[in-house]
Image (spheres, grey):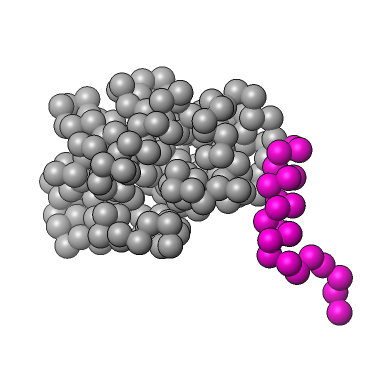
Amino acid sequence: MSDYLKNPDAIYSLSFATIDAEADLSLIPANARAVARRVIHACGMTDIARNLIISQDFVTAAEVALMAGGKILVDAEMVRHGIIARLFPDRERIICTLNDPRTKEVATEIGNTRSAAAVELWRPYLAGSIAVIGNAPTALFHLLDMIDAGAPRPAAIVGLPVGFVGAAESKEQLIANPRGTPFVALRGRQGGSAMAAAVINALLGGAE
């Protein structure tokens, strides 16, 4: 029999103790460090802390939005499923329009990807909601373009798209000009649905 730690509580505690020992969170706002820990826990890479940007007002703005009944707008079903049900049982408030039958037509109309078209369908829900992008850089680019063109600003943006084309650039655009919107972003190519969902789980009390 292999000798390894089997107690789930001990595994969880040791995981966060390791994060605290290895990650430099000094540049993260104090009230956002639980968010940072949860993101690191989701990917297993303590070195991302140096590239994780969380605005000073993100946690407060996002928590207010959640308490006020705001929607959680997600760019991928993986993000939706990553949000822990026991922490957020009102699943109808999590909106993913990627598989909406209108997205293909909208994508053709705007000359963009289905992910961008899905964000276009967020318009009725944007005000007072949290926009969570954990997959497609085109979704983040299009969201920022929509805001620039006069669309309602969401209460907060989680900008964690992943990939080799556009991911780093879309996040840098958000960091350089967040359009007056509290945000989370991770510089570079790294990101993903698990990390994006982890931000929401931390806000809901699912951190250590």
Q: Which residue occupies the foreground of this view, 44 or 146?
A: 44
Q: Residue at x 35, y 24 (%)?
A: 178
The relative height of residue 151 versus residue 131 in the rendered view (above or below) is above
Q: Which residues are magenta?
A: 1-22
Left of 205 or right of it: where is 156?
A: left
Left of 116 or right of it: where is 54?
A: right
| Residue 206 can be seen, yes or no | yes
Q: Residue at x 51, y 51 (%)?
A: 206
> What is the chief secondary structure element of the magenta stretch?
helix
Q: Quick check: is 14 in the magenta stretch?
A: yes
Residue 4, image x and y in percent? Answer: 82, 67
Q: Quick check: is 177 in the magenta stretch?
A: no
Q: Which residue occupies the foreground of this view, 141 or 122?
A: 122
Task: Determine which quarter of the picture holds residue 96.
Answer: bottom left
| Residue 195 can be seen, yes or no | no
Residue 188, image x and y in percent? Answer: 53, 34
Q: Residue at x 67, y 56 (%)?
A: 12
